[in-house]
Image (tube, rainbow, N blue to C red):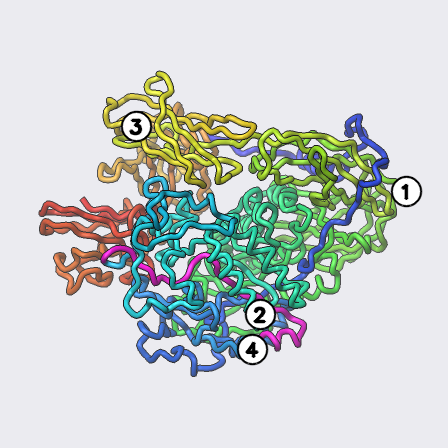
Amino acid sequence: MPSRARTRNGAGARRAAVGLLAATIAISTASLPAQAAPASKDPASAAQHSLRAPVTDENFYFVMADRFSNGSTANDQGGLGSDPMVSGFDPTKKGFYNGGDLAGLRNKIDYIQGLGTTSIWLTPSFKNKPVQPEDKSAGYHGYWVTDFTQIDPHLGTNAELKALIDEAHARGMKVYFDIITNHTADVIGYGDNNERKGYVFKDKVPYKTADGQAFDDRDYAGTDAFPKLDAGTSFPYKPVLEPGEEDLKVPAWLNDPTLYHNRGDTTFTGEDSFYGDFFGLDDLFTEHPTVVNGMKDIYKNWIRDSGVDGFRIDTMKHVNDEFWQDFGPDVLNYAKEQGKDEFFMFGEVFDTSKSFTSQFTTRNRMQAVLDFPFQDAARNFASKGQDAGTLQQFFAGDDWYTDADSNAYQLPTFLGNHDMGRIGSFIAADNPGATDSEKVARDRLAHELMYFSRGNPVVYYGDEQGFTGPGGDQDARQTLFASQVPEYLDDDLLGTDATHATDNFSTAHPLYTGIRELAALTKEHPALRNGAQQGRYASDGPGIYAFSRTDAKDQREYVVALNNSEQPQTAQVPTYIAKRNYTRIYGDAAAKAKTSDAGTLTVTVPPLSAVVYQSSGRIPHSKSAPAVALQQPAPAAGDNGRIQVTADVGGTSFYEVTFEAKQAGGNWTPIGTDDAAPYQVFHDVAALDAGTSVEYRATVLDNGGHTATSQARSAGVPAPVLTLQQPAEGSNVQGAVELSATADPEKSSNVVSFQRSVSGGEWTPVGTDSSSPVYSATDDISALADGTTVQYRALMSGPGFSVVSGTRTVTVGEAPQPDSVAVAGSLNKAMGCAADWDPTCAQAQLVLDPADRIWRLQADLPAGTYEYKAALNGNWDTNYGADGQPAGQNIILNHPGGPVTFRYDNSTHLLSATYAAQQPGAVAAAGSMDSELGCAADWDPACDQAQLTLDPASLIWKLTYPDLPAGSYEFKAALDRSWNVSYGAGGASPGANIALKHDGGPVTFRYDHFTHVITAG
């Protein structure tokens, strides 16, 4: 049956708030285990303050130079002439240079500083390949670098960059570069036709030395040694350079094709996410010491010559760990040698799981990462109005980042960016039909959360002017100066009647003034920037989320309360101080409030807004240290390479807990200090052998300077966890089965074996793979009869462990379709059914399309929020919910009103809702057969004869040609009559060409924008 939403009455909500307080603040002495200890007699125990790195209080302004201000029209064409396909300059197209430059940034630096900005972060500004013909787009964004030593001529000169940095420094501001370490512009092609190709996996075609010996590059990563390679024989594809581009890249070492992975385009998953080319961009062999040292030299020179204050590092998660473990510490040490004591680097790790993103600041020794998990949580809270408790849970996970030299306080936080889209876009999409004032209020609430919570807030240029846009990438890169791009002129900006047809540098815009106010307030009250953050209260549902910020030295408490509901909300918020006056310093609420005998502060917060109160005095000093005891350390859920170490502290005041670890015969070593309950760290033990014993202890420091140390507790390093990634459980398979597995933690020494069991029989070997980080094999099942069940598992052994994965069961043969599929839910009455949640209703039945084996139904529904599932065979015996889970959670649909198409894929059990409004304006089958279709040339995305037609009910694009001559062809899907967006094999963008061997006669091209897959048959 469908999942029903839980409801609680007021008493339940009060119980939830009290439970939250007990869990995060007032861990009573009675709850401490028997081994709770007073002050340790061990003189080596050391209490420390929670770390505050040099950069925990910056206000970043993230700006794309080409889209900010045009200070000099003389460099618009980059000295390359007037042809846009040569110079890359075309101010009427969003995918080309529009004219902004460094001179424009310097001319408008008052505007940037007036926002409260302390650091300017520039998108990559080095010399780019101006146009990549395959993409029919220009390098205005900076990610197609050919010369890492020179500023792009479209943006200015090295001298102009130095002048900008000097001007910023004179004003007390910093400048950060966005840098790239893992790829260059697309210069290398593959094969005789110098083309982009699909990815070839290492277990299929391993790397070979120049002498022809197969090897795994991971065995050499992080060392000074690497086998000699030969461009003609060492790679799955032979790298080819266009005539005239053999020496295009600077420095010169970048022109050696053996210093690239040369394995084809990535699909951004598994092994190829480390080794594949990003949309054809040449992917550097970052495991090779020549690349590691070369990249370090490039960026050390920029530090020395320009005085830059830090780096944001692109695509960090797509580079091997050993690269960062060398690059980060070495570059940071060099910067400090140059007098840059506050030099700061943070990486892009596009993921919302803290257990994963934090690995780059702990295991990989980098200072910080962009806080993508925060962006997701902030959108959910401020824009989508989700439960306040989810925000409480989000911040409770900050301890994943805590180690001896970093923590969550130094993470740059943000609300949107040049890739994913703007916060204004998200708010407009999440709140269809909302008034402009509501959208502005939600936008401001998101910024209030970002400025008042831990981390360094990042404002994406244009957000302060209410910029929106229909999506990410080019749709989120509007100019602040007057635009000539038709797509941008259609945008509806928040908080203003202005459009992109005029300059948008208004310092009176409500979002500009709001952000300026937030920056000024946090400057006046620095505890709001880098004080300890303690979760305090979360409503049960949309409503108030509250937390404290407290400076460890000043000991004055600030209470921040944010309300994401559309009604005023009141809450009793726990604090550190009983019977004390608190004064409002921000927001629309009572000017003063007083805590109760129990230390709770009653606050009322208006809809979609925030209030901040400051205590009139400091937190009273503790008279003695509280008792402290460790819980049993255990492997961390979410990262098997770390051990979760948690301390229970018997008190309710302000405490800081330092955790230490040691191995047999070693010394106690600090592994992190936590300043907010629950007190915990996630100790990285991935480098240790399984079974190694590690001893832990915790020392609490109270605000009176007293300390107490727990008794020590030991834990063994867990054995690695081996997980089968393929095949999918319950799937149907034919011909050959692709098997893959991953190990947690991953080590280059891992060797994984695969086994199968046919119809419950004995386990027999399938294959073995040592090519990390994804282990794979292929099983030939062509001799097995349809209907046969086959189980698979993976095995691995090593020092101190022998592990077996879970099993995956598949069935040989084509997947049988159900007799019927219904979209059953709270929308059934709106469809014309007699009742909601009716799997038998005729109007709710989907229809199977035999061409692609997808079930579809178009329905015209009123605007509203609905819940639904896929119910098979006219009953609830078999049903699938969110993420295709059997009997899973209800799927939520926020529907703007009008037609919607539901699609169900029985191979994945995913039921989804799609809209015609999400479809592109045009789709072409662009390829080597276009001339046969009647086009003037092949590979022409604008040719009328190659255009597919959208079926409004199924939302499938189709083109049938009655008599295509026999032959071998290649093609892709090209959207909107250009190559700006295209999809190739497997729906990858731009992806490899799709091969079509045709016997002659009719052919139908089909494109599904949901999967981006185009087929011919």
Query: What is the count of numbered marks?
Result: 4
Q: Which mark is residue 1013?
A: none
Q: Is residue 91 above or below residue 203?
A: below
Precedes in sequence: disc 1 or disc 3: 1
Magenta segment: does it hold 188? Answer: yes
Q: Secondary structure at mark 1?
A: loop
- Label number found at residue 623: 1
Q: CA distance from mark 2 to mark 3?
A: 56 Å
Q: Which residue is mark 2?
A: 509
Q: Earlier in the sequence, mark 4 or mark 2?
A: 4
Separation (CA) of disc 4 from disc 3: 64 Å
Q: Position of residue 95 (x, y in %)?
A: 37, 66
* Residue 173 percent across, percent down from the top left: 64, 70
Q: Secondary structure under badge 2?
A: loop
Q: Which residues lie in the magenta part? A: 165-192
Amino acid identity at mark 1? Lys
Q: Earlier in the sequence, mark 4 or mark 3?
A: 4
Between 951 and 258, the residue placed more toward the observer is: 258
Residue denoted by label 3: 818
Which of pointers 4 and 2 indicates the residue nearer the eye? 4
The magenta stretch spans residue 191: yes
The amino acid sitting under disc 2 is His
Mark 1 vs 3: CB contact within 8 A: no
Q: Is residue 826 above or below residue 109?
A: above
CB within 8 Å, label 4 to label 1: no
**What residue sits right under mark 4 in the picture?**
106
The image quadrant where one finds the C terminus is top left
Check disc 4 and report its element: helix, strand or loop. helix
Disc 3 packing (10 Å; few <14; some 14–19; many ≥20): few
Left or right: where 947 falls relative to 650: left
